[in-house]
Image (cartoon, helix red, strand yellow):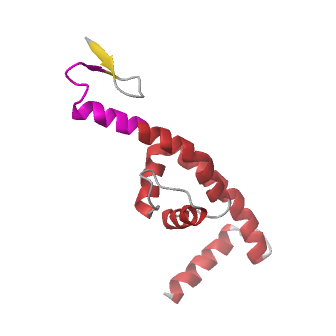
Amino acid sequence: MTSTCDNIAITCSSSEVHSASCAAARNKAAADKYAETMKPALLELAASGKFGTSGIARELNTRGVKAPRGGNWHRTTVGRVLKRLGKDFEIERRAAYRKREVTYQRRVFGKLLGPSDLEKLTADYKKSK
């Protein structure tokens, strides 16, 4: 005989209803669902220039968004949510950030930077270290 675990469509045998594997399946489903709800906010943060996990965590805490367990965000928590969303989302997130990067380059340097400009900036940075 099978029964359905709470809140998800995973079937567990009657002996597994309270087992760790069924609980793990429920936890994974809840984490996947939470990560999906965070997608728009993470894309918006990337578009506004917040790309690193620490910057995202800081911004989410500033906005009062609670982490999955109801506490504050940390860079590790952000990293786990991003990892859970997968490579396809990472491509979307990088694209959102790059759109903003063009605006940033024009504002700071007055023009789009070409490969030679970027190489010069990299060399200057390495010399300063």
Of residues 55 and 60, the one nearer the viewer is 60
> How many numbered tags mark residues here?
0
* Residue at 45% in and 54% down: 70
Q: Is residue 92 left or right of residue 11?
A: right
Residue positioned most to the left: 15
Q: Is residue 19 above or below residue 78?
A: above
Q: Quadrant of the N terminus?
A: top left
* Residue at 57% in and 77% down: 122
Q: Is residue 92 above or below residue 78?
A: above
Q: Is residue 78 above or below residue 8?
A: below
Residue positioned most to the top: 1
Q: Is residue 12 left or right of residue 40?
A: left
Expressed as whole percent of the image width and height from the top left, the position of residue 56 reads 54, 62
Q: Would you identify the image quadrant in which residue 109 lies? A: bottom right
Expressed as whole percent of the image width and height from the top left, the position of residue 17 reads 26, 25
* Residue at 51% in and 82% down: 126
Q: Would you identify the image quadrant in which residue 16 lies? A: top left
Q: Is residue 18 left or right of residue 120?
A: left
- What residue span does the magenta drawing correspond to? 12-29
Expressed as whole percent of the image width and height from the top left, the position of residue 105 reads 73, 70
Of residues 55 and 8, the one nearer the viewer is 8
Expressed as whole percent of the image width and height from the top left, the position of residue 91 reads 57, 47
* Residue at 46% in and 62% down: 72
Q: Does residue 44 belong to the magenta stretch?
A: no
Residue positioned most to the right: 110
